[in-house]
Amino acid sequence: MQLLGSTTSPFVRRIRIWALLNQCSLEFINLDIFSDTDRQLMIQNNPARKIPVLITKQQTLADSNNIIRFLLEQHSQTSLNWQQEHLLTIINACSDSLVELLLCQRSGFDTQDDKLFFNLQNERIAETLSYLNNHFADAEFKSCEYLCISLYCLLDWICFRELTDLTAHTELMKFYHSFAQQQAVQQTDPRN
Ligand SMILES: N[C@@H](CCC(=O)N[C@@H](CS)C(=O)NCC(=O)O)C(=O)O
């Protein structure tokens, strides 16, 4: 199986860490999705023009949510329950808004400008991080490996890109520092 992605994408890193922790062999194809040749490979495999993409002998799957569902099934592991899916949706919403704002910044916009689109993203980022901080102690959250991996990838990406201040979110920061000790985390560090 091949995984199309980049070392910096938090959505791709989730899948890579899960695979390392679960003895799942994936050939990681590291793309620069904004370079002409690498972009062609992404587009050929995903009309939505996003990473990650998983290519198996039978099919091509886009979107980290579908990819993890497929991999859990392949490894005979239980899928996320509804409460866990809900928490994953909150992590995804925060990640998506941060991606949108980063693309706006790279397009030359001031994302702190008092504009509807920026305000909506900035509100969503603040509220979802508070929600995750308040719910991290929930049993469904802490006990789910993929949720913990996804949360870590979001937090580390925020720190790596210096996207927002996390210091007020004390539960998230405690989790961030403890999870960082794992080998799979260090092996997938975008800074290396
Ligand atoms: N819902 C998707 C989101 C994936 C996503 O946003 N990937 C980003 C990289 S972090 C991307 O490919 N962005 C390209 C673009 O927005 O044009 C997933 O869970 O896989």
Image (cartoon, grey):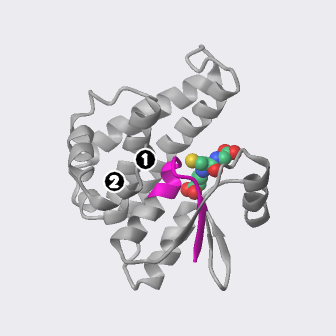
Q: Is residue 1 above or below residue 90?
A: below
Q: Does the residue tagged 1 have its C-beta within 8 Å of any atom of ligand 1?
A: no
Q: Determine the residue positioned at 61% across, 36% down.
A: 100
Residue type (three-letter) at the residue carrying disc 1: Asn
Label 2: few (<14), some or many (≥20) within 10 Å?
few
Q: Determine the residue positioned at 50% across, 43% down.
A: 95
Which numbered tag is attached to residue 192?
Answer: 1
Which numbered tag is attached to residue 52?
Answer: none
How far is mark 2 from mark 1, CA to CA?
A: 9 Å
- Residue 17 drawn in magenta: no
Q: Split into 4 quadrants, where in the image is the N terminus?
A: bottom right
Residue 28 x/y as whole percent: 55, 66
Q: Secondary structure at mark 2?
A: helix
Answer yes or no: is residue 81 visible.
no
Answer yes or no: is residue 131 visible.
yes
Residue type (three-letter) at the residue carrying disc 2: Gln
Question: Where on the picture, by quarter, is residue 84?
Answer: bottom left
- Residue 10 drawn in magenta: yes
- What count of labels does the image hold? 2
Question: Where on the picture, by quarter, is residue 138?
Answer: bottom left
Residue 51 x/y as whole percent: 62, 56
Q: Determine the residue positioned at 58% across, 32% down.
A: 102
> For mark 2, what is the residue?
186
- Which of the two discs, 2 and 1, labels the residue nearer the N terminus? 2
Q: Determine the residue positioned at 69% across, 49% down.
A: 33
Residue found at the very far top of the displayed protein: 114
| Stretch of the chain drawn in magenta | 1-13
For the residue pair 22 and 84, the one nearer the viewer reads as: 22
Mark in the foreground, 2 or 1: 1
Is there a contact, CB below 8 Å, between mark 2 and mark 1? yes
| 68 horizontally vs 109: left or right | left
